[in-house]
Image (tube, grey):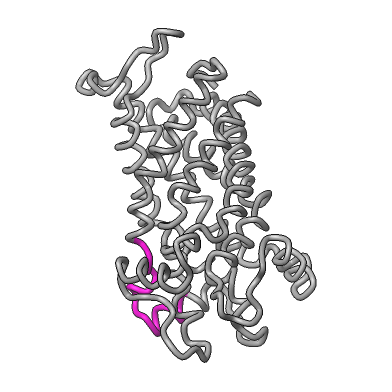
Amino acid sequence: MLKQLFCGGMAGACAKTVTAPLSRIAMLFQVHSLVSTKGLANPQFAANLPDAFRKVLEREGLASFWKGNGTSVLHRFPYSAINFAIYERSNTAFSKSLASRGDWGGAAARFLSGAVAGSCAVCFCYPLDLIRTRLTTQLPQTEHAYKGITDAVIRIYKYEGLAGFYSGLSATLCVAVPSFSISYMVYGSLKEYVLDDERFSNFRRVNSFNGNTHMTIPATLLCGAASGSLTAILTYPMDVTRRRMQIQAQYVEIADRMTAMQHIREIVKVEGTGGLYRGLMPELLKVTPFVGTTFLVYEVLRGAFHLTDKP
């Protein structure tokens, strides 16, 4: 189990690094209106994807696309490990309880297991997620920009206390719980169809080492992309909200800080309903490479450790 957790953690960390540029651009779009009107002479972020990449490259250089990625990797490794471990155990328990429900029971077990796993992983790793968001979205020319992970930890604790590390947690749980629930349910259901239905026989292979049947790489990419895309579309408005709540302490006076619902109302009022989906395109573009990198790294490491397909 420890080897499998290590493989999953490394796969998640590598996938985060590969897709870091798209993740950063998506975050910048999400918080655009919160940070671009704070007395700065020029708009900080662009209105479309190509211009966003160009402006960030010109302003901060190529390496800036990976700003905050160190924290992201530190966050992703335990996040993936905890998620994997709790999901497997929860799914086993729920599957036994719902075994008499047929196909519906299997989908429900995955949905509930995803909710439990996502909640536990988020609560345990949240401070790193918050620091990553602040490092990724902060403007380099601002007076109080963090110098790095250590500086962020010290200053958050000094000026906001322990509670500062959990700013926006409620909004994040509103994203994580349905996100993991939908993701595991959709991906698991699609995987069952591919592995069991003869119409998809060309999309599965038998492992000659242990005799287990598994999906081909294209099938895994398609199932992962479908699951990730649907999840992103359904939960994106709350993701925008939680990012804004995570960074508002850097840009907004205490008296003017807002709750999740106040952020949503403000976004719709100022930017329209479309404001709740700012940055969705780079978020969707990163789904397939994220899944692909995760799969590739996990399979390579699993082969190196001689692990079977069973958890």
Is residue 277 visible in this depiction of the protein? no
Extreme left residue here? 199
Give the magenta range. 264-280
At which x and y percent is residue 134? Answer: 59, 67
At which x and y percent is residue 151? Answer: 72, 66
In the rendered image, the vertical position of residue 114 relative to residue 295, given as above or below: below
In the rendered image, the vertical position of residue 124 relative to residue 139, given as above or below: above
Instruction: Residue 186: say if magenta.
Output: no
Q: 103 and 78: which one is in front?
A: 78
Instruction: Residue 276: say if magenta.
Output: yes
At which x and y percent is residue 41? Answer: 46, 91
Q: Residue at x 54, y 43 (%)?
A: 13
Most common secondary structure along the magenta stretch: helix
Q: Residue at x 54, y 45 (%)?
A: 115
Q: Judge left or right: residue 211 versus residue 92.
A: left
At which x and y percent is residue 156? Answer: 73, 69
